[in-house]
Image (spheres, helix red, strand yellow):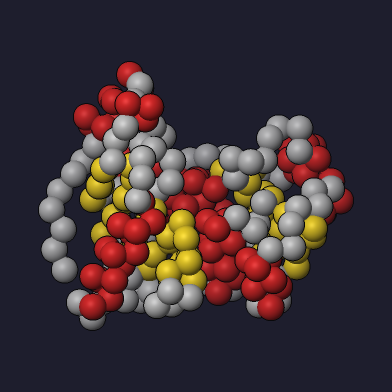
């Protein structure tokens, strides 16, 4: 599974149990919390008892400290981030049990697709700062945006907010060399350094849809 429409169809089942491998990551814990708030049954694992893990546990989310094959038993969807490799015991078990396996960016794409205006901010440096400032602008304009930032944003004491308006703002931490970047209705790329460039990445940058924002 990797097609956005397939993931959306799968998420129509609110009884779905979703497992996040690497759930303590700044982006992963935000997605897990947002889905939990939407009524999904969420759980996961990580290797560190971090503040993010403690916060999720305080919300009633079951989290294992260690990656073990038995952790994924009873789950219907397996979400992983870039740190989780193919030899991870949870990944191996999920595939053995025919549990759909999707990347963090793929479930983000599915969440984003339900908003009329999606804004992706990417680049080599300062993504979280610019995403925070953009989110603040929209909040000051009396909108209620949904945003996911790669750092805790002090005004809301969180890396995410689930809003009520039609705006979705994302700190797109991976440079725009993947298909998620093409889904944004408004794209911002900045701070490009020579180490960021390749023929593949440059093609995506040249083809990116960039348009003015208005609030």
Q: Where in the figure is residue 141, as x and y percent of width and height?
A: 20, 77
Q: Is residue 198 above or below residue 4?
A: above
Picture residue at 35% right of the left edge, 76% below the top: 164
Going 49% across and 46% down the picture, which residue do you hit? Answer: 105
Considering only vertical position in the picture, is 142 above or below 94? Answer: below
The quarter of the picture where residue 117 lies is bottom left
**Residue 19, horizontal then vertical, whole percent:** 69, 56
Work out whether residue 42 or residue 49 is closer to the camera in this orientation and state it: 49
Q: Residue at x 24, y 37 (%)?
A: 208
Q: Residue furthest top?
A: 199
* Residue 142: percent from left, percent from top: 23, 80
Can residue 35 be spotted in the picture? no
Query: Which corner quadrant holds the N terminus?
Result: top right
On the rendered structure, is 145 left or right of 71? left
| Identity of the residue furthest to the bottom in this view | 142
Q: Report if residue 137 is visible in the image.
A: yes
For this view, does 215 lie left or right of residue 126? left
């Amino acid at each position: 599974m990797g097609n956005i429409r397939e993931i959306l169809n799968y998420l129509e089942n609110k009884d779905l149990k979703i497992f996040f491998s690497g759930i303590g990551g700044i982006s992963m814990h935000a997605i897990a919390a947002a889905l939990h708030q939407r009524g999904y049954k969420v759980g996961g694992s990580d290797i560190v008892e971090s503040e993010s893990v403690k916060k999720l546990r305080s919300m009633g989310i079951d989290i294992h400290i260690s990656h073990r094959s038995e952790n994924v038993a009873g789950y219907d969807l397996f979400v992983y981030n870039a740190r989780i490799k193919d030899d991870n015991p949870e990944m191996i078990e999920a595939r053995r049990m025919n549990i759909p396996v999707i990347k963090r960016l793929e479930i983000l794409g599915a969440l984003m697709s339900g908003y009329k205006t999606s804004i992706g901010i990417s680049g080599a440096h300062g993504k979280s700062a610019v995403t925070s400032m953009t989110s603040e602008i929209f909040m000051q304009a009396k909108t209620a945006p949904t945003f996911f930032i790669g750092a805790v944003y002090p005004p809301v004491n969180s890396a995410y907010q689930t809003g009520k308006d039609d705006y979705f703002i994302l700190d797109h931490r991976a440079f725009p060399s993947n298909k998620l970047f093409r889904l944004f209705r408004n794209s911002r790329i900045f701070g490009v350094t020579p180490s960021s460039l390749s023929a593949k990445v440059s093609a995506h940058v040249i083809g990116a849809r960039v348009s003015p924002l208005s609030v």
